[in-house]
Image (tube, grey):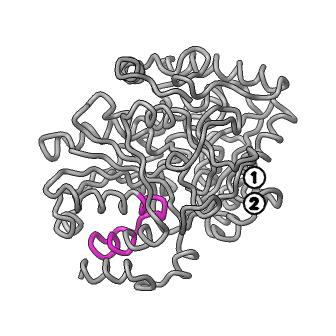
Amino acid sequence: MTNPDVAQADDLLEALIAGTCPDAHGRFGEFGGCYVPETLMPAVTRLAEGVHHYLRDPDFRARLNDELEHWVGRPTALTHAPGLSALWGADVWLKREDLAHTGAHKINNTIGQALLAQALGAERIVAETGAGQHGVASAAACARIGLPCVVYMGAVDVARQALNVDRMRRLGAEVIAVESGDQTLRAAIDEAIRDWVSDPVATYYLLGSAIGPHPYPYLVRELQSVIGKEARAQIIARSGSLPDAAFACVGGGSNAIGLYHGFLGDRDVALFGIEAGGHGPALGEHSATLSAGKPGVLHGTYSVLLYDSDGQIQETHSVSAGLDYPGVGPEHALLRQIGRVDYRTATDDEALAALDECCAAEGILPALESAHALAGARRWASENPGTKILIGMSGRGDKDMPILAEHPVGSSTQSEDARNAAA
């Protein structure tokens, strides 16, 4: 990995803003690309051609926009957070993807890809999921358009996200628990790709994050960019100006890349990505890929990964299942490399404390993933009092209640402090 000079970094950022990055080969600078078995190349090529055509087709866009408005419930709200504002000494605003249908930003991507799969003549859809929200959104989107859906989910995540597993099944999806590998999101992606390889013509792989081989990072970004576009217009209309900083949690990175794309050209808006710091700095204790990883290839793309000195991908940890992944989208790798986004971490305890604080101060139960963004924003606000902060609320926390039951309110010093401050 080489670091570009200032002029190169500016050129790459301008390409992102102009929509000419990734290039025709799916490269975000040196990151991205398409590393898949030869048997998948016809399917990937057909998908890339379909993306190029349908995302520019007025009839397809009209149908997608109709579903986003009348089924997903867009635009989602921008909520001022007076309680957190008072506690943090900042002006805090929340972009409420937790209010979208199925409870998270994932539905923006799944309905778009489901419509694309239908247009391409797919007969069935396979998907993977970690926290379960992408699985639920995939099941819902497939039910909406009438295609069968199979969702692969790591056995560990099946156990800790039982509520979402039941939701997927009630929405008509077949859920397959993956017992191999680390039994979390990485293993689920492995199995979904194996399924796709076995029938690349009739099967459409509905990838859940801004990762994977080209054109998926681009496709997911385009479908999720509605978040940032809405948020930018809303915060100007509601508050009269842009925020000083915007925060989002980052695992694979789809909600974050969607939020950032509303503000990449606003150089005065600082952008922050908050990764899962877990419970320690050693490999296997966290999922902080951009903070601790190195370049490599995983799941069809060249990005930044967590692997050991022998090149072996490492198991990861986060209290939030959706951030428990040893890689990150290639566009995030580029944004870090050129310095447009500052990637930091929040520990499990910090996320749990931020969740408690948001519940008590705002009456909003965020997803544990979103709680990482809250924790990072809280820390930055303490160093930058009086600033205006926008936080991407990627999803709601109903799905996390079994995990939260193991961490009762006040079970950590940070949680107790947050609760007392909110009271």
Q: Residues within 10 Å of mark 1 (few under 14, many from 20)?
A: many
The furthest residue to the front: 309
Label 2 neighbourhood size at 10 Å, few (<14), some (14-19), many (20+)?
some
Which amino acid is tagged 1?
Answer: Ala
Residue type pointed to by label 2 = Gln
> Is any atom of residue 341 visible in this view?
yes
Say which mark, if any, is on residue 280.
none
Q: Is residue 149 visible?
A: no
Q: Is residue 184 above or below residue 257?
A: below
Looking at the rendered structure, the number of numbered marks drawn on it comes to: 2
Tell me which residue sits at (40%, 50%) in the image: 248
Cα separation, mark 1 vs mark 2, equals 6 Å
Q: Which residue is mark 1?
A: 187
Magenta highlight: main SS: helix
The residue at which mark 2 appears reads as 183
Q: Secondary structure at mark 1?
A: helix
Looking at the picture, how far across and down is residue 368, in whole percent?
Answer: 48, 64
In magenta segment, residue 364:
yes
Whole-percent x, y for residue 356 in the image: 37, 75
Residue at the right extreme, as displayed: 198
Instruction: Residue 142 in the image: state x and y as whole percent.
Output: 65, 44
Could you say which is closer to the camera, residue 357 or residue 58?
A: 357
Quadrant into which the N terminus falls: top right
Q: Quadrant of residue 417?
A: bottom left
- Image point 63% across, 67% down: which residue? 161
Determine which quarter of the picture holds residue 11: top left
Image check: 86 left or right of 302? left
Q: Tell me if residue 357 is in the magenta stretch.
A: yes
Q: Residue at x 26, y 56 (%)?
A: 79
Highlighted range, magenta: 355-372
The residue drawn where x is 85% and y is 25% is 39
Q: Nearer the viewer, residue 71 or 316?
A: 316
